[in-house]
Amino acid sequence: MRPSVVIACFLGLAGSTNAAIHGRYVVKRGVLELRAEGYDFVIAGGGTAGLTVADRLSEAFPKKNVLVVEFGDIEYAPGVFDPPKTSMSDTSGMSSRWTLNSLPSPELNNSTAFVIVGKAVGGSSATNGMFFDRGSRHDYDAWDKLQEGGYGDERWDWDSIYPYFKKSVTFTPPPTAVAKEFNYTWDTTVFGNTTPIYASLPPFQWGDHYLARKSWVEMGIYNRKECAGGDKEGLCWIPISEHPVTARRSHAGIGHYAAVAATRPNYHLLVKHQVTRVLYRGANPKSGPPLLEIKPVNDDQSSSRFNVTAKAEVILSAGAFGTPSILQRSGIGPWAFLQRANIPLVLDLPGVGSNFQDHSGQRVEWNYTVPPNFTPMPSDMLNATYAAEAAIAFNQTPAQGPYTLAMSNSAIWVPLPNMTISYTILLDQIRSMLNTTIGLKDPKAAAHYHLPTDTDATQISGFRSQLSTIHNLLANPHAPSLESAFTTGTSVASVLLHPLSRGTVRLNLTDPLQPPILDYRSASNPIDIALHLIHLRYLRRMVQTTTLHDDLHAVETLPGLALHSDAELIGFIRNVTTQSYMHPCCTAAMLPRVEGGVVATDLRVHGVAGLRVVDASVFPILPSAHLSATVYAVAEKAADIIIRQWSEKYKAASSD
Ligand SMILES: Cc1cc2nc3c(=O)[nH]c(=O)nc-3n(C[C@H](O)[C@H](O)[C@H](O)COP(=O)(O)OP(=O)(O)OC[C@H]3O[C@@H](n4cnc5c(N)ncnc54)[C@H](O)[C@@H]3O)c2cc1C
Ligand SMILES: *[C@@H]1O[C@H](CO)[C@@H](O)[C@H](O)[C@H]1NC(C)=O
Ligand SMILES: *[C@@H]1O[C@H](CO)[C@@H](O)[C@H](O)[C@H]1NC(C)=O
Ligand SMILES: *[C@@H]1O[C@H](CO)[C@@H](O)[C@H](O)[C@H]1NC(C)=O
Ligand SMILES: *[C@@H]1O[C@H](CO)[C@@H](O)[C@H](O)[C@H]1NC(C)=O
Ligand SMILES: *[C@@H]1O[C@H](CO)[C@@H](O)[C@H](O)[C@H]1NC(C)=O
Ligand SMILES: *[C@@H]1O[C@H](CO)[C@@H](O)[C@H](O)[C@H]1NC(C)=O
Ligand SMILES: *[C@@H]1O[C@H](CO)[C@@H](O)[C@H](O)[C@H]1NC(C)=O
Ligand SMILES: *[C@@H]1O[C@H](CO)[C@@H](O)[C@H](O)[C@H]1NC(C)=O
Ligand SMILES: *[C@@H]1O[C@H](CO)[C@@H](O)[C@H](O)[C@H]1NC(C)=O
Ligand SMILES: *[C@@H]1O[C@H](CO)[C@@H](O)[C@H](O)[C@H]1NC(C)=O
């Protein structure tokens, strides 16, 4: 029955007056509306992971109370390309976001990263590009391998996480005519059908959509029927996180809150409140679950702070920037930094806000010397009649037309050995970086691994393990290193999937409640430049295929035919790299504490009581995918772990 409830609620949301929304599920707006007795589980951040966990816990424990504290509000969260937008780059009406600029990255001509972060019920899933892909099995097998030497029985290899990928999403095949028109392929057995988070293949493509796919097949890239089943290298159709009938965005705020809240009196959501920090009694991190200190978003007086009590535990799900900020404000983080910040130390945990990663890359562009006549094309949206028809089509049942196509749903994932025979030289470079006489505690060690100067010995040890694991991923002919997606137009991005550069996320000491300071340090590890170069050289071959070059007279305009040598292309890379594809992660990594980790395999924060992290910050390394599907799967698995651990405790308590 859940799916039909969801449609009703969604239409409520899309109808979009706040009154209509609050009539259905009453969110809390002030601390006086909270339970005076406190809660059992308190979750910081009502985003992709936080609402998934809240939904599962409130369902499994109907007599226990769950509170989610969210910075943003319930928002009508439009898709990337919903009416009345006429271009995909139109970001108007997107108030539910933070837009951040990083510090300059010296290796990239001091350019800064531009990053968007979701700030609404549903978090980044309510504002993202809706590209809904899973990583490769080798990514998660690598995560699991990195846990060796840690404690805890939970496994995170592909076989262990795959059931949660399935559970987390409902895939609905497209109508036969649509499938035939675009040659869509899929395998329903890799998806579930119970959770109202939807993955769908849209009933629309632009007139030139097939060009890239045809060129890629010509380049010898394997055309894979389904890429969500663990094997991902090749050319893929990727579902969009949208409802199969309405084609409206499907996100955690709808599927894991709006769809269930009306029937879950034990599931509370407080909006427009910021979690400032967690507080341990007597600053003793073993003293049991901490209090969660919160404040209204628009009230900075210290008297407006309020402590929420959690009888069972506190779960941090504030995302890759929000979670390490809360921990650092709580005195849990790198000792030297906290001392400089004048924050009383509760626990020295150097991994908090370290190990920061994101996907980055450049673009290959071309033009047509003989203008081809594709139809329809995005430029048609400038024709008022066409745009009006598109809006009408989108409101049909089922929805039709260009507005059903979000950002993109077609892409390649290519392993390094498929791109160049000289990849072994790069693997040699990684091995020689590993093969060193420098000890972990040597003052020169951080520089040897191109890590930030304040990196401690545990993190260096953890980075060595990552280097070795990523070496094996890059050597693996089935593990992707490059991603490139195409929708329409004359450009494709070359995305580096497994960077070796590591940045930091640290509080802004001028105002620690503002978004933190992001130091991307992109391309600080020279291996990343070498990888970008291989990827770029490979991807530009696309413009030389029969499809683009012979049939359509395409000419490469970026990097441009004038750039040949490694030095020229590296200059181009240093000049134009996009440092963030909006996939920040790994800033409270699941790794053993002796390897610089922040959480154990059951996602409990090392060395403290009653505190867990569940969001993209726990990833140890980036997967070969956009992050939302993996965040949902991690959150589903985390919820299962939490439910199992507390069921046992509650059972033991009741039989006492
Ligand atoms: C513009 C953009 C495009 C993207 N495109 C794609 C895509 O096409 N496909 C894809 O798979 N992934 C995409 N991603 C990435 C993906 O959406 C995110 O990685 C994922 O949703 C993160 O989930 P999370 O639970 O870790 O964090 P979020 O979903 O971001 O949730 C964190 C929540 O915590 C709240 N919060 C933060 N700090 C506090 C605080 N102190 N107190 C209270 N609340 C707080 C935030 O408001 C937010 O709601 C995109 C992301 C963005 C921003
Ligand atoms: C980047 O900025 C730093 C500090 O301002 C400066 O020393 C350096 O020369 C700059 N690098 C480039 C390539 O401009
Ligand atoms: C779909 O596949 C058929 C048969 O392989 C091919 O003839 C046709 O051009 C393809 N259509 C598109 C849009 O790719
Ligand atoms: C990589 O190359 C091998 C050998 O040519 C080929 O069989 C395989 O399909 C290629 N992989 C991809 C993802 O294209
Ligand atoms: C919150 O708890 C801390 C630690 O116990 C205490 O010092 C502080 O006064 C409390 N704040 C409020 C508003 O009750
Ligand atoms: C295409 O790009 C080439 C190389 O930059 C340029 O010489 C040519 O004029 C461009 N053609 C068109 C039609 O824009
Ligand atoms: C505008 O779009 C309408 C509807 O698709 C079409 O009939 C008309 O020819 C278009 N006009 C132009 C100038 O392309
Ligand atoms: C590691 O370094 C040592 C000393 O520099 C060298 O003798 C050895 O061959 C290297 N091993 C590998 C696998 O590169
Ligand atoms: C830190 O916060 C202050 C005050 O909000 C702001 O002016 C400054 O730009 C921030 N610094 C950075 C690096 O973002
Ligand atoms: C870098 O970009 C600037 C400005 O766009 C341009 O003038 C310069 O030629 C570029 N350098 C390289 C090496 O591409
Ligand atoms: C570095 O960036 C500056 C300013 O954007 C640009 O003028 C310059 O050409 C760039 N340097 C190189 C080497 O590309």
Image: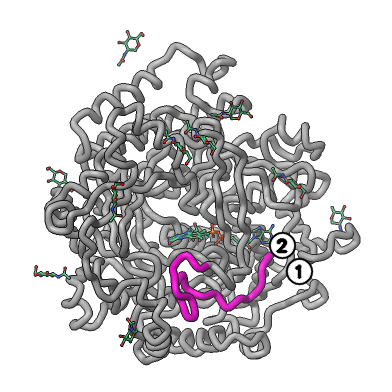
Residue 418 at what x, y percent from top left? Answer: 20, 40
| Label 1 crowd bin: few (<14), some (14–19), many (20+), radius 10 Å | some
According to the picture, the residue beneath numbered tag 1 turns out to be 38
Q: Amino acid at mark 1?
A: Gly
Q: Quadrant of ligand 8?
A: top left
**Magenta segment:** 71-90
Judge whether 636 appears above or below 436 on screen: below
Task: Between residue 391 and residue 249, name the one nearer to us.
Answer: 391
Judge whether 598 appears above or below 643 on screen: above
Secondary structure under the numbered disc 1 in the rendered image: loop
According to the picture, the residue beneath numbered tag 2 turns out to be 310
Residue at left 70%, top 72%?
Answer: 270
In the picture, measured across the screen, residue 534 lies left or right of residue 243, that is left
Residue at left 83%, top 64%?
Answer: 299
In the picture, measured across the screen, residue 631 lies left or right of residue 61, that is left
Give yes or no for contact between labels 2 and 1 (Cβ–Cβ under 8 Å): yes
Judge whether 169 appears above or below 584 on screen: below
Q: Amino acid at mark 2?
A: Ala
**In which quadrant is the C terminus drawn?**
bottom right
Residue 482 at what x, y percent from top left? Answer: 31, 45
Which of pointers 2 and 1 lies earlier in the amino acid sequence?
1
Residue 233 at what x, y percent from top left? Answer: 24, 50
From this viewpoint, is residue 404 visible? yes
Residue 227 at what x, y percent from top left? Answer: 26, 59
